[in-house]
Amino acid sequence: MSNRPAVILEDVEAALQQAGKVMDITPEDLLTIVDLTLDQAEKRQSTFEGKQWIGEIMTVPVITCTPDTTIEEAARILLEKNIHCLPVVDQGGRLVGIVTESDLIFQFSAVPAGGFLLDLLMRKKLPKSGHTIGEIMVKKVTTVHPGDPIQKAIQLIIKHGYGRIPVVDGDNRVVGIVARKDILHFLK
């Protein structure tokens, strides 16, 4: 049983789509669906070289900042570490927000809210201004957990256009980050 891949809803959907027909379910049809579903699960699992959980592909350790970090310091960290975002954590390492390159660029923009830069970066809210990360960070952050399937991160990246998603534990402490490159690394 341990040799069988974990089946997720997307595997079943892909198998049904591959079958390509509406079926009255007979035992034979059900076996066909089960076989196709297992094939899809094996194909998905082999794509990630046997890895199926976010915790197996996430980047650790994560470079973070605090709400008191200055905008200039955050920009310096992003440039020096060649990263694109900083999860913002409290004293206990719990996630309280996130700041991206785009959030920082807005601080130096002469374009008024609603202008070309805002449209270009597809922001749905007015840029905030301030001197510290706590004043400009996005407070509502989508996260995943190390035990979530890789497919969950892929769906969030596709649906929302995220470049990276913080990985948190049960206490909302940042334990990793999963980026598009972490997923692309496994494409063959």
Image: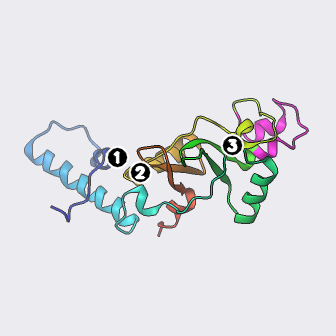
Query: At 51% from the left edge and 67% from the top edge, which residue is drawn?
Result: 185
| Residue where numbered disc 2 is placed | 151
Looking at the picture, tell me which residue is in the foreground, 155 or 27.
Answer: 155
Q: Main secondary structure of the magenta part?
A: loop
Image quarter for residue 30? top left
Marks 2 and 1 close (CB-CB < 8 Å): yes
> In front here: 63 or 41?
63
Q: Amino acid at mark 1?
A: Glu
Q: Which label was assigned to residue 67?
A: 3
* Mark linked to residue 99: none
Q: Earlier in the sequence, mark 2 or mark 3?
A: 3
Horizontally, residue 123 falls left or right of residue 144, namely right
- Callout 1: helix, strand or loop? helix
| Residue found farthest to the right | 110
Label 1 CA crowd tier, 10 Å (few <14, some 14–19, many 20+): some
The amino acid pointed to by label 3 is Pro
